[in-house]
Amino acid sequence: MTIFTELSIACRSILAGATFLAVVSLFALVLYGISSRARAWTVTLNAVLFLATTGFAAYVMCVAVEPENNPLSIPWLWLLVIAAALFVYGICAIVITRYKRKDVLSPSSVKETLDNLDSGVCFADGSGRIILVNRAMAKLSSVLIGSYPQTINELKNSLEDLKTDGVEKVGNFMYRFPDGRVWRFVIELMTDESLNGFTQVTAQDVTEIYHTNEEIRAENEKLKEAIEEMKKLMVRLADRVREQETLALKIRIHNDIGASLLALSQILSTGNDENAEEHLRLLQHAVWHFSGSDEGGEQSFGDVKETAKKLGITLSLKGNLPAEDDIKKIILLAAKECVTNCYKHAGGKTVTVAVTERKDLYTVTVTNDGAPPKEPIKEGGGLTSLRETVENAGGEMHVSHAPNFVLILNLPKGGKKK
């Protein structure tokens, strides 16, 4: 095989160039190892290999130019293989080292990661000197302080005593910057034993959350105002309904009085007193309503009992009267009406009112010991008025004539159900 010195000048130059490429690749490998902080022994080994290859490449170049003065009895193919092997080694070592670096956490990778965060991050040692700050925090600090922060106290004081135009405190640890963004700053001591004494400052962009909370707060205020207006409307509506019901009642009573007076006038002029008793009773109820005496003025069961006693009727109560005034008032009206009917029509001596409390209603049963009605009872006057009162309260009224007179009221607890 032809040795290197026997080759032509062109071939010798090509092989010398190949060795030079090997030197370049090894030099790049050494530089990359230093910049990437590779292991010291690896960098040293590559540096030695680089220096040896450099010397060998320099000698090959000298031989290529003056072969007669610098003998090199090495086959040209071996020289090409050595140069190619060193070149490939340098390139492959760089690629492998770079690939391994992706899985290795280095200080530079940590700094790069922090700089790429949208949130601001800052660390200070035990003396308060800032040792690490990312880009976002540096920009925020420059707005607050006017320069790059040197100590943690500078940052704290700027947050506690705002002197920068355009920076506004809008909540606990929240600040609005001149660009309109809202940041939340948190200063806390590190609790890990290895980081004892270090302080961490973080700044998080909470612009969207802040504006959302402001919108919710504004909507709540509007809702509160709407509720207050609704309450006023409900009160006015209740007054209006009460006025309409009172007006309707007065109109009905007015009509009853007119009809009764007209009928009584005809009775007096003709002498026909067939329905005089009924017209007198209607007139009595109407006078009670207009006088404001609430159906005769009885405000308690004892009052109704005393009225019944004057008529020679004993009124008894089984159970307890409800505490609800509206329900109790209806029961008293029913008791008075039944006492009146027992005296006028049944000829009885005792009227019994039984009150039973159920889950969501009261059942009131009124009976007497008088003669049972001979035919179904025709409601009119008092019973009709009582039925309207019961139904307006959301209840039910049932009247039975056989085998004995029984009045049953079902009254809902709490008043009328919607």
Image (spheres, rainbow, N blue to C red):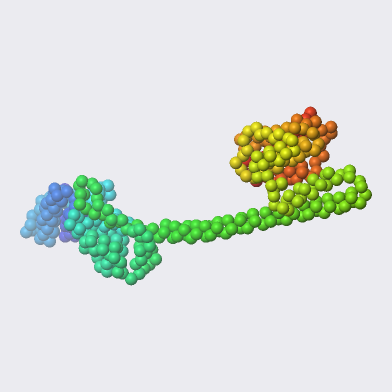
Residue 199, given in percent of the width and then of the height, sits at: 24, 54
The residue at the point 73 percent across, 56 percent down is 247
For residue 397, say whether it is visible.
no
Q: Is residue 67 above or below residue 368?
A: below
User: Which of 95/227 is in front?
Assistant: 227
The residue at the point 69 percent across, 56 percent down is 243
Residue 146, given in percent of the width and then of the height, sits at: 27, 69
Q: Residue pushed farthest bottom?
A: 165
Residue 300, given in percent of the width and then of the height, sits at: 64, 42
Report which quarter residue 410 is drawn in: top right
Is residue 152 toward the left or the right of residue 207 in the image?
left
Residue 282, given in percent of the width and then of the height, sits at: 79, 47
Count of numbered tags = 0
Is residue 61 toward the left or the right of residue 357 in the image?
left
The residue at the point 65 percent across, 56 percent down is 239
Is residue 271 toward the left or the right of residue 21 in the image?
right
The residue at the point 71 percent across, 46 percent down is 296
User: Which of 288/372 is in front?
Assistant: 288
Q: Residue pushed farthest left?
A: 69
Is residue 136 toward the left or the right of residue 409 in the image?
left
Report which quarter residue 145 is drawn in: bottom left
User: Which of 61/20 is in front?
Assistant: 20
